[in-house]
């Protein structure tokens, strides 16, 4: 990374997530006056003590970054409070969707095929999420919302795509709620 960044005269390296940020920091440390280092994360909560302990390694690096990018203001506020990152230069760049690419007209044919593939009725409102099954992704809240909307008479279905630590509990919630 160091050789490539120098050979290509790269001015900024953006390390997405904490582990790559560690490597970028170590590789670029001798050139920090020439190469800016930006880090980012989409992690809000850590799953276990081991992940929490690793923050002792990451925090000094985060504080030395030129900028640290969060996916939401809520995540930024939580991290700044929890890890006392008041002096770190931070910003928020929300995850986005290309609305032109996913426009109704462009996706109409794919919708019919997808509904068939996932056993979704043609007349239902489909809510969905594509993410790791983690506490902060709140797939359980989506399941509860579907139940509440159905209770109000809406024909709603949900498609949850992903895997992770919380998947079994979300599947259990779906069964418990009869969805």
Image (cartoon, rainbow, N blue to C red):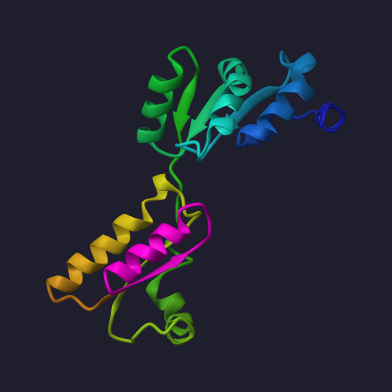
Q: Is residue 112 above or below residue 88?
A: below
In percent of width and height, residue 118 lies at 45, 81
| Residue 177 painted magenta | yes
Viewed as shown, does residue 120 lie left or right of 61?
Answer: left
The answer to whether residue 34 is magenta is: no
Rendered view: 39 above or below 43: above
Dividing the picture into quarters, in which one does residue 5 lie?
top right
Q: Nearer the viewer, residue 128 or 14?
A: 128
Residue that appears at 60% across and 37% down = 17
Residue sticking out furthest to the left: 152
Q: Is residue 28 left or right of residue 72?
A: right
Question: In which quarter of the view is residue 36 placed?
Answer: top right
Is residue 179 visible to us here? yes
Which residue is at 14% across, 71% downward? 151
Q: Position of residue 147 (x, y in %)?
A: 22, 68
What residue is rendered at 45% in x and 54% in y? 166
Q: Residue at left 25%, top 61%?
A: 144
Residue 167 in the image: x percent, y percent?
46, 59
Q: Quadrant of the C terminus?
A: bottom left
Magenta highlight range: 157-179
Which quadrant of the structure image shows residue 1? top right
x, y percent for residue 64: 61, 15
- Counting every numbered tag in the picture gives 0
Taking the image as shown, residue 133 lies to the left or right of residue 21, namely left
Nearest to the observer: residue 8 or residue 47: 47
Residue 130 visible within the image: no
């Amino acid at each position: 990374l160091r050789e490539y960044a120098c050979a290509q005269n790269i001015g900024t390296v953006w390390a997405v997530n904490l582990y790559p940020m560690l490597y970028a920091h170590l590789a670029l440390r001798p050139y920090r006056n020439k190469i800016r280092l930006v880090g980012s994360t989409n992690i809000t909560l850590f799953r276990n003590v081991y992940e929490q302990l690793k923050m002792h390694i990451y925090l000094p690096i985060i504080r030395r970054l030129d900028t640290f990018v969060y996916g939401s203001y809520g995540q930024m506020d939580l991290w700044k409070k929890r890890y006392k990152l008041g002096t770190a230069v931070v910003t928020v760049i929300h995850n986005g969707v290309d609305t032109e690419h996913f426009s109704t007209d462009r996706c109409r044919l794919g919708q019919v095929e997808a509904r068939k593939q996932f056993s979704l009725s043609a007349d239902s409102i489909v809510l969905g999420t594509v993410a790791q099954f983690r506490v902060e992704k709140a797939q359980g809240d989506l399941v509860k919302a579907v139940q509440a909307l159905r209770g109000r008479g809406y024909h709603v279905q949900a498609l949850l795509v992903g895997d992770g630590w919380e998947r079994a509990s979300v599947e259990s919630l779906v069964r418990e709620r009869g969805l």
